[in-house]
Amino acid sequence: MHTVRDSQMTEQSPLFDTYARAPIAFDHGEGSWLVDTRGERYLDFGGGIAVSALGHAHPHLVETLREQAGKLWHTSNLYQVPGQNKLAKRLVEASFADRVFFTNSGAEAMECAIKTARRYHFANGHPERFRIITFEGAFHGRTLATIAAGGQPKYLEGFGPKVEGFDQVPFDDLDALKAAITDETAAIVIEPVQGEGGIRPVPIRFLRELRALCDEKGLMLVFDEIQSGMGRTGKLFAHEWAGVEPDIMAIAKAIGGGFPMGACLATDEAAKGMVPGVHGTTYGGNPLAMAVGNAVLDVMLEDGFLEAVRDKALRFKQGLASIVDRYPDVLAEIRGEGLMLGLKCVVPNTTLVKELYANHMLTVPAGDNVVRLLPPLTATDEEIAIALERIEKAAENLSGGDRA
Ligand SMILES: *Cc1c(COP(=O)(O)O)cnc(C)c1O
């Protein structure tokens, strides 16, 4: 649709070749919109992969970071960081957890969750209980342990022996899960809504069965809510829909609204092995991140915020369902919860992502031939209407087999 004018984007780059980047760079953002270096406006319904939950340049976040930047950036965890205590207290009050460890990313939050689960059994005198069960289609990050947890061959290949201690079972298969549990099993790790795997919500019944099974067998139940958490599904955490609480939970992405940060939450009991000296991070929980994390919560915990997300999500989903009905040769299904939605495609998902991009709308592909819609939770009704128009137009253009 348009040509790349910035030659820097096509020249040989000194960067690692690990990303197939779109030939576009953004200069600034305003709420649900991103403006590229040529001044073109894009409706951002990818949110930098579920990160920009309060949109771009949210005034409260910008002001908070500016103020903190003039005061103090970093001290390390050798000293008290008051912002950590404040944010941890608020996360604990709003969740099942009693304890929090702050990280810089989702994968690190998952590493902490895995280490916490293993240390729990070690502290109980069972160091042999270290194995972790995960589910097909899972994504838990790109460190050596989290690619082993995710179990996807395409992420494991060429990186040496897979980290020991991860067993994978089919999604939503209780019998297979039960068969995989041994005397060495420490924990079950699951995303309440699979993100990268294609916006696959775990049935509520299955989450309840997991809780019962973990209680029966003395296993830690670990939720990866890095993508599904922080209001994305219309509850602060997706597992609240099932009324099932984990022992340990990893969060990241939206918690910093675009500032890199993550956290591992746990009950007192689950965190009992995490004693002085056993785990640490230089940057995790630094004052800049804590200021922004607290500012994000200021907005998300306001009365009516999550209710508004649920209302908007309902209207968006209804509009999408009607488009799916009218273009069955392009779209197969709409799935997901709240503003964590997936369009299961009939055409290749990347074809739809490109068509939407041509219509100046950003989305994210996922597994299972799904296009993810992860708009800012602050998106207005008008922006959702624009999104529906653009998706409809894209579906129309791709319908009838008149395009390659
Ligand atoms: C993004 C994501 C991760 C990894 O987070 P990073 O910040 O990229 O390390 C882990 N689990 C889930 C469910 C995610 O969506």
Image (cartoon, rainbow, N blue to C red):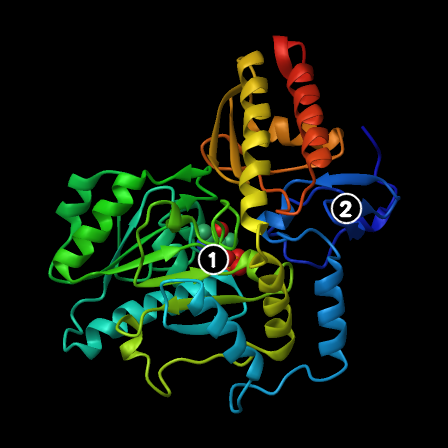
Residue holding disc 1? 142
Q: Which mark is residue 309?
A: none
Which of the image's four quarters has the C terminus?
A: top right
Which of the image's four quarters has the N terminus?
A: top right
In the picture provided, is 232 more to the left or to the right than 403? Answer: left
Please provide percent x and percent y for residue 145. Answer: 38, 62
Query: Residue at 28% across / 67% down in the picture?
Result: 117
Q: Is residue 372 visible?
A: no
Q: Secondary structure at mark 2?
A: strand
Q: Is residue 10 above or below residue 327?
A: below
Q: Is residue 248 above or below residue 374?
A: below
Query: Residue at 42% across / 73% down in the picture?
Result: 100
Whether disc 2's CB lies below 8 Å from ligand 1 is answered no
Q: Is residue 104 above or below residue 373?
A: below
Q: Is residue 320 visible?
A: yes
In the picture provided, is 57 more to the left or to the right than 392? Answer: right
In the rendered image, the residue lying farthest to the bottom is 79
The residue type indicated by label 1 comes to Arg
Which residue is nearer to you in this view: 89 or 389?
89
Report how far apart the C-alphas of labels 1 and 2 lie in the structure: 27 Å
Please provide percent x and percent y for residue 311. Answer: 56, 37
Q: Secondary structure at mark 1?
A: loop
Query: Residue at 28% across / 46% down in the picture?
Result: 207
In the picture provided, is 387 more to the left or to the right than 50? Answer: right
